[in-house]
Amino acid sequence: MTTAAAAPFLPWNRPSLGLEEEAEVLDTLRSGWLTAGPKAARFEQEVRDSLGAEDAFAVSSCTAALHLALLAAGINPGEEVITPSLTFCAAPNAIVQAGGTPVFAEVDPVTYNLAPAAAEKAITPRTRAIVVMHYGGQPADLAAFRKLADDHGLLLIEDAAHALHAWRDGARAGSVGDLAVFSFYANKVMTTGEGGMIAGRADLVQRARLLGRHGIDTSIWQRHGAQRTADYEVTVPGLKYTMPDITAAVGLQQFRKLPDFTARRAQIAAAYDQSLAGLPGLRLPTVLEGVRHGWFLYPVLIDPVGVRTRDTVADTLREVHGIGTSVHFKPVHRLAAYRYVECSLPVTEHIAARQLSLPCYPAMSSTDVQRVIDALHTVWS
């Protein structure tokens, strides 16, 4: 068994960066063009073509993408947007900042994704959109949500922050909604350090692009990079959410490595599946038939038994074995800013009280993976 005394601390997540990213960034630095320009445009094109989307716009964060998606959708004050509470605060924050009202609906007890039946039950005459997060990298029921949105005349936004390279029933995450948003934060399936992207219907992405560059009708690259006139027009009050080329340079190389990253994550998940099955009170993730999981998270549920709880297991892994873990997520309706939202979400509460994310990322060696497995068996012994 490997112990903390014999090995350095193993973090919950660590990005995989190599010489290719260094060379691409150096090329950008030497070009003299650091802000949104040709590399951001190339990055947008590669993601757009891979998704089969009508358009894509690279932005400064996934939160920026969520905000722009809701602004492009034209959410009006008082209009409701359905979303899970078992998510990061970015989605409800964006809903509020766009002027909407978040409505939290229940998740599926197996996948932890927003449940279509619960979302349908939450629809009112004020509902304008549904934001569906693909929890941990397992896509939600895209076909059901597409039908639900179409039947009720709602906009469907996929929060695919965890799932850039995941599929369900032949459909890629991010390819079914009217809009989809992706995260390239440091711990995601690929990274640009900070960054995100919005993709989908051309009319909505074009509106988001306009809003995301101050409301200016042409990009800085169109005006200066191509040595055209610097004259421009501001057609709508906008924001500054563009992705700079120095960030997109990292994204170009990371996106090309994403299939290998995903394959390695799947190998680690398979090792956990095989070696941790049977530990009493430890529920491993379930992957539905027809799903290619992105494995941003390997989320286990730990039933409290005596002094062994989710929190004591996390503490022991960190303090005794030098292994980091994380929790995804504290329910948004339990956060101070959202306690005013009335909802009853027993499944969400049950999952949130037990969920723990184990390390699962491409930079892990086989020794690292075995170290996590051995530590958990020790905790359970």
Image (tube, helix red, strand yellow):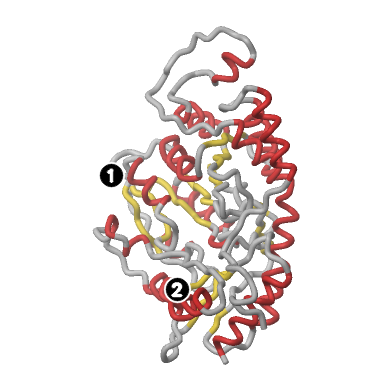
Count of picture labels: 2
Q: Residues within 10 Å of mark 1 (few under 14, many from 20)?
A: some
Could you say which is closer to the camera, residue 9 or residue 379? 9
The picture quadrant where one finds residue 292 is: bottom right
Which quarter of the figure is the N terminus placed in? bottom right
Residue carrying label 2: 351
Q: Position of residue 325 (x, y in %)?
A: 52, 69
Q: Position of residue 242 (x, y in %)?
A: 51, 31
Residue carrying label 1: 78
The picture quadrant where one finds residue 170 is: bottom right
Q: Quick check: 167 left or right of 340?
A: right
| Residue that protrudes farthest toward the front in the picture | 5
Could you say which is closer to the camera, residue 315 or residue 5? 5
Q: Residue at x 57, y 92 (%)?
A: 381
Residue contact at pointers 2 and 1, CB within 8 angstroms: no
Callout 1 amino acid: Gly
Q: Residue at x 65, y 40 (%)?
A: 250
Q: Is residue 296 visible?
A: yes
Q: Position of residue 140 (x, y in %)?
A: 56, 60
Callout 2 amino acid: Ile
Element class at badge 1: loop
Q: Position of residue 186 (x, y in %)?
A: 56, 50
In front: label 2 or label 1 = 2
Residue 223 in the image: above or below residue 14: above
Q: Residue at x 58, y 39 (%)?
A: 200
Could you say which is closer to the camera, residue 197 or residue 191? 191
